[in-house]
Amino acid sequence: MGIKFGISRRTALMGMGATALAASTGTPLRAQTPPTLRYATGGGFGPNEIDTVFFTDFMKKNILKRYGKDYLLDVTYTRGTPEATALMAAGRIDLAAQSCASFVSALAKDAVPGGMKVIADEHDVRAGYSAQSFYVLEGSPITDPKQLKGKIIAVNAFGTGVDLLLRVVLKKNGLDPRRDVRIVEISFPSIGMALREGRVDCGVLPLPFGATELAKGGIRELFNGTAAYPAYSVIFQAATNQILTTQPAAVRAWLADYVDGLHWLHDPANRKEAVAVVAEVAKSTPEVVDTYFATKSDYYRDLNGCLSSDLLQSQVDAMVDQGFLAKRIEIKNYVDMSYLPHPCAG
């Protein structure tokens, strides 16, 4: 399902007609409707995908100062980053939340007409911050990834960043992801229940889902993303080259609002309101969200949206090693931070 903030095709055509009429008669017009950016989420909510917080009425009305003036958003919520990539390849969206695995798979297939680029970071796994964690039941005999042989493991979707992460960890522990375990797809919000009902033996619960389930008790972390890579980008924003060429000002306006919003959300002076809006999106309580959001228990976020290609290249190389890619891709050739409002180092 999507949230539609744009205008209908009929309304757009009426506006075009009115513009032509005004040009011929000299009649003054009100400001033109700003361009609509079609955006697809990557399957997460709240802190696990911070862009979803920006799509709330509160943020649009109070924080996104350029929204409605320089751009509009037409948002589609997906189950995972591969679905978002497929929508981009079909020409149905312009921007999307992406993981490295989905983005690079699409690059290798030349799936998006005209190509695409990484334009902003959302969150990373860094030392001292939260990582993407896989959980087992508190009473489970599994205490080491090596003991997952013959077990069922849940990820949100095949081909996602967490799916790749899992396969890297399994291989590091002597297990073949194709033969030694059974990997299944379950949406993030349902993985906790699947664990408790015994339908899976292990499952990934990134924030905010992990924090919510830990608050209920009965589960424990088995391993996290640092078992695969010491530091890496988890979710970032990508855009088609077409939208970057045809509507660069709208993209810059969105990213300027995005960066302003990141600073607002992380400002201690706004803590109460920020926690409330994040909790609403995360379908959690403010009390739980307050224990981790914008702290060292949360993911690392560069508040200017900057992303180093080094945080992606290690994942690209892992994809080659795992057989997801036939040959290595230099990811720096597809990273462009110039649409952000502030310069990025390096």
Image: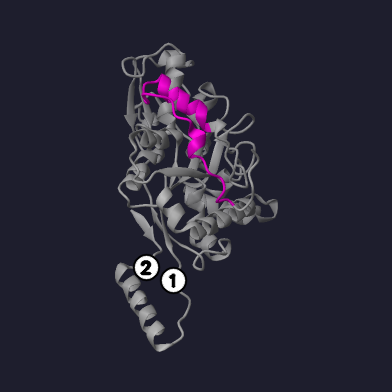
Answer above or below: position of 143 versus 226: above
Residue kind at label 2, given as amino acid type? Ile
Residue at the (51%, 65%) spot, across then down: 70
Q: Which mark is residue 7?
A: 2
Q: Toward the viewer: 141 or 82?
A: 82
Q: Work out whether mark 2 precedes mark 1 in sequence or the reverse, and give the earlier one.
A: 2
Answer above or below: position of 15 versus 248: below
Range of residues picked out in magenta: 312-340
The color scheme shown is: one colour
Q: Residue furthest right?
A: 269
Q: Which mark is residue 33?
A: 1
Residue at the (39%, 36%) spot, across then down: 107
Q: Residues within 10 Å of mark 2 (few under 14, many from 20)?
A: some
Answer above or below: position of 245 versus 175: below
Is 152 part of what is drawn in magenta? no
Q: Toward the viewer: 35 or 209?
A: 35
User: Percent x, y for residue 153?
Assistant: 37, 25
Q: Are marks 2 and 1 in contact (CB under 8 Å)?
A: yes
- Secondary structure type for disc 1: loop
User: Percent x, y for residue 249?
Assistant: 51, 60
Answer whether residue 77 is visible to the viewer in this image. Answer: yes
Q: Tell me the quadrant of the picture where the C terminus can be found.
A: top right
- Secondary structure type for disc 2: loop
